[in-house]
Image (tube, helix red, strand yellow):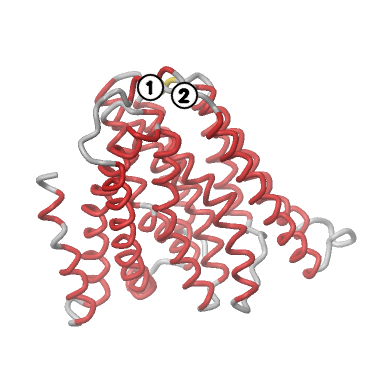
Amino acid sequence: MRFILPMLALVPIALAFKYAHIGGPTGVFLASALSLIPLAGLLGRATEEAAIYTGPRIGALLNATLGNAAELIITIIALRAGLVDLVKASIAGSIIGNILVVLGLSLLVGGLRNGTQYFDAKTAGTNATMMGLAVVSLSIPAVFRFGPAETRPSEQTITFLSDGLAIVLIVIYALYILFSLRQGSPESELREHSGAPTMKLSIALGLMAATTVGIVFMSELLVGTIEPVAEQWGLSELFIGVMLVPLVGNIAEHIVAVQVAYQNKMDLSLGIAIGSGLQIALFVTPVLVWISVLLGHPMTLVFNSYELAGLIGAALIAVLISVDGESNWLEGAQLLALYLMLGISFYFVG
């Protein structure tokens, strides 16, 4: 905490750069990105405290929901501007990033610090199955859209299909939350959170809400500089959407999940990493489909082949890692290696 509080000075510095026109887009980009680190650190502390009261499952759900609030606002702003392709790329990138970057860094840092780490395989298996279901669901419209010409449905049919899938995704996500909350806490979860809290639950929840508001403002500030910065650096819109926007928008989950993995609280760490990706796929995405209609820029669930390849690969490796209930630093390095390979590939597309 003694390092986090002084770094909060970066928040007014980022605002000063923006409104005093200091440093140009690159200066605002760097200042706002760095300002997210202390905010995410406070969110992580509040999440740990809340999880002591509520358990890792609800604590992880709270963290994922608050962390994805920034993502939802960012994408709504982009939809209002008519950047539908950028929004879909951002959705794919968020899911890929949560599995490969957030989970990868957590396993790597936690494994180097604690050796082999253990988590509840049943819960992890349920999450991995849901992730596989989500990716398959998001692949269906593209399969129909790019099928043989003689059986290919019209664009209007694809739109209706996307709207219908959006409803199904929200329903299955609600059932998943209900199922998760009704499950008893395994012994590993009880062991992780046997310590006494250092702040009241109301204070922890208030701190989570306050830091989320700060993260939303700083994320919006940062995203506003992404396009000019990317243009200066020669990056494509696909690369911006898949790699850059999610990496920045999910920085809170990155830091919090790695922080608790370092402390050997793997059920909470996996709950944040996988749970955030699931929420993006099963809740945020269908919500955006309906919001896009209201904003006059209808968005279908047709992702391009590059995005689908990344989604399927990330979901597959997440399933393989989750089946045995234990993890090590090498598995984290493997996830990060796949993300790096995808990043190199997306750099040369578009």
Answer few, some or many: residues within 10 Å of disc 1's Cα (few below 14, many 20 plus, some between 14 and 19): few
- The foreground one among 162 and 100 is 162
Q: Is residue 122 above or below residue 257?
A: above
Which residue is labeled 1 in the image? 190
* Image spot of residue 141 (x, y percent): 72, 56
Say if 54 sits above or below 142 in the image.
above
Secondary structure type for disc 2: loop
Asked if the residue under mark 2 is in contact with the one under mark 1, i.e. CB atoms within 8 Å, the reply is yes
Of helix, strand and loop, which one carries label 1? Answer: helix
- Label 2 Cα crowd, 10 Å radius (few <14 / some 14-19 / many 20+): some
Q: Is residue 228 above or below residue 70?
A: below
Apparent side of residue 65 relative to residue 156 in the rendered image (left or right)? left
Residue at x 34%, y 64% (from the top left corner): 219
Q: Mark 1 or mark 2, which has the lower sequence index?
A: 2
Tally of numbered discs: 2
- Tell me the quadrant of the picture where the N terminus can be found: top left
Label 2 sits on what residue type? Ser
Which residue was labeled with disc 2?
185
List x then y, in percent, for residue 264: 30, 26
Q: Position of residue 43 (x, y in %)?
A: 29, 48
Disc 1 residue type (three-letter): Leu
Q: Answer left or right for 206 relative to 4.
A: right
**Viewer-closest of 314 and 211:** 211
Q: CA distance from mark 1 to mark 2?
A: 7 Å
